[in-house]
Image: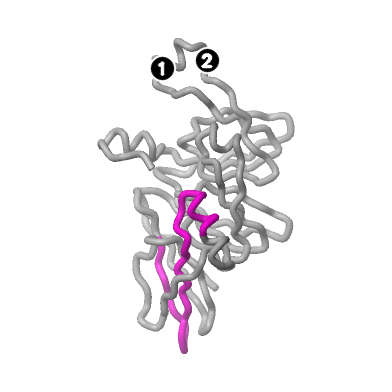
């Protein structure tokens, strides 16, 4: 599998597949494909009905779209639904990443996707259920706006508005902290909680909170 990211404010990723090679895309994220790439709906997580149902609890579709190149090389292009950047991750053996469902675009190995529950994630705004990807695998994410990346060292911490969380190292989970006094929580417009991460950890953020964007344009939050 080969790939390249193109574009500026609304990036897409072109994935080139060898004959017979498969690739898995989140529902509704395909921009285009070559004629020899066939599409087939598969239960998410590389499993059956139960695992597919678990995926719906993470806020995503129970199905992934399996793309297969037939007879010769094929190309499939992916993109998010809000202007933003594509982040490519090459996870090695032993590496794991927790992903907010809206950020997931596609992967070369659906069996490396599983759903994890976290009450901290729920109250921090990242969601009660997150998608965990375990290496080795290639993972593509879509970040709303620009990509903000932090590589926290041991002893370092950072507090994040939950609506900006896209992905983070599975070795850490955010701690819940309040934004301040009751007055601050009620009138600052910053919500109730911040998500506090402690290093060592890699954290990837959307520069644009899709929650706040949806509210600004009058759309429903989901």
How did the renderer colour the structure?
one colour
Q: Which mark is residue 151?
A: none
Task: Identify the secondary structure beneath mark 2.
Answer: loop
Is residue 3 placed above or below 218 in the rendered structure? below
State which quarter of the image contains the N terminus: bottom right
Q: Which mark is residue 188?
A: 1
Residue at 44% of width from left, 71% of height from top?
A: 41
Q: Residue at x 50, y 53 (%)?
A: 87
Q: Residue 187, how many percent across, how many down?
A: 39, 15
Q: CA distance from mark 1 to mark 2?
A: 9 Å
Left or right: 4, with 212 as reference point: right
Give 48 or 213, whichever is nearer the viewer.
48
Q: Residue furthest left?
A: 218
Q: Report the span colored magenta.
A: 53-78
Judge by depth and name the residue closer to the eye, 29 or 78.
Answer: 29
Q: Which residue is mark 2?
A: 180
Image x and y of residue 63, in percent:
46, 64
**Callout 1: helix, strand or loop?**
loop
Q: Is residue 61 magenta?
A: yes
* Mark 1 in CB contact with mark 2 (< 8 angstroms): yes
Question: Farthest residue in the bottom direction?
Answer: 71
* Structural crowding at the residue carrying mark 1, measured as other residues with C-alpha within 10 Å and reported as few (<14), some (14–19) or many (≥20): few
Which of the image's four quarters has the C terminus? top left
Local crowd size for mark 2, using a 10 Å CA cut-off: few (<14), some (14–19), many (≥20): some
Residue 114 vertical position relative to residue 127 in the rendered view, above or below: below
Q: Is residue 49 left or right of residue 155?
A: left
């Amino acid at each position: 599998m080969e790939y390249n990211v193109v574009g500026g404010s609304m990036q897409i990723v072109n994935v080139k597949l060898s004959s017979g090679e498969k690739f898995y895309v989140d529902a509704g994220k395909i921009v285009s494909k070559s004629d020899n790439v066939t599409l087939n709906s598969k239960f998410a997580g590389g499993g059956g009905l139960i695992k597919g149902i678990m995926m719906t609890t993470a806020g995503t579709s129970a199905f992934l779209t399996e793309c297969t190149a037939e007879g010769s090389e094929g190309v499939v292009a992916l993109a998010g639904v809000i202007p933003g950047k594509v982040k490519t991750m090459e996870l090695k053996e032993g590496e794991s990443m927790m992903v907010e469902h809206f950020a997931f675009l596609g992967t070369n190995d659906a069996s490396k996707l599983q759903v994890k529950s976290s009450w901290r994630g729920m109250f921090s705004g990242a969601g009660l259920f997150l998608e965990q990807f375990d290496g080795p695998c290639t993972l593509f994410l879509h970040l709303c706006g620009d990509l903000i990346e932090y590589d926290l060292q041991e002893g370092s911490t950072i507090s994040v508005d939950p609506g900006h969380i896209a992905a983070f190292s599975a070795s850490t989970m955010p701690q819940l902290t309040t934004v301040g006094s009751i007055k601050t929580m009620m009138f600052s417009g910053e919500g109730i909680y911040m998500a506090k991460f402690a290093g060592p950890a890699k954290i990837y953020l959307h520069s644009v909170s899709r929650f706040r964007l949806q509210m600004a344009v009058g759309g429903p939050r989901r």
